[in-house]
Amino acid sequence: MASNFNADTAKQVLGAVTTFAVELEQIIAAAGVGGSFNAPQVEQLTALFGNLAGVVIQAVHDASGQQLTPESVLALMPTTATLQAPVE
C-alpha cells in the first residue's frame, strides 16, 4: 500500500462514497416505487454514478501507489466488459 493512503484518506473516500450513495438514494426515492424518472433526474443520477466511479478509481490508484492514466483505468475494467458508444 502506498504511504499516502492512510486511515484519514480512507475515511475521506468512505465519506465521499457515502455522500454519493445518499444522494442516489434520495433521487431514487423521489421517483417512488414504480415511478419514473424525468430527464433532469436521470442526468443527475448519471452524474452521481460517474462521480462515485471517479472516487473509487482514485482510491484504488492511491492505495496501490499507481499513477492515474487512461490505461490504468482500463486495466481495472473486467475483461468481459465492452465499451459502448454514448447514446445521444
Image: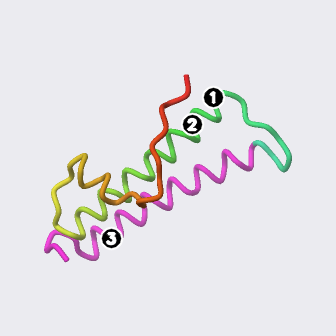
Task: Return the mark for residue 44.
Answer: 2
Question: Which contiguous range is marked in magenta?
Answer: 1-30
77 and 5: which one is in front?
77
Task: Return the mark for residue 10.
Answer: 3
46 and 20: which one is in front?
46
Task: Return the mark for residue 32.
Answer: none
Q: Residue at x 77, y 42 (%)?
A: 31
Q: In this figure, what is the number of numbered marks? A: 3
Q: Position of residue 38 (x, y in %)?
A: 72, 30
Check whether the beta carbons of the residues at disc 2 and disc 1 lie within 8 A of each other.
Answer: yes
Q: Residue at x 51, y 47 (%)?
A: 49
Left or right of 61? Residue 21 is right
Left or right of 50? Residue 4 is left
Q: Position of residue 46 (x, y in %)?
A: 54, 40
In the rendered image, which residue does mark 1 sit on? 40
Is residue 5 in the magenta section? yes
14 to 57, vertically: above or below: below
Q: Residue at x 24, y 70 (%)?
A: 63
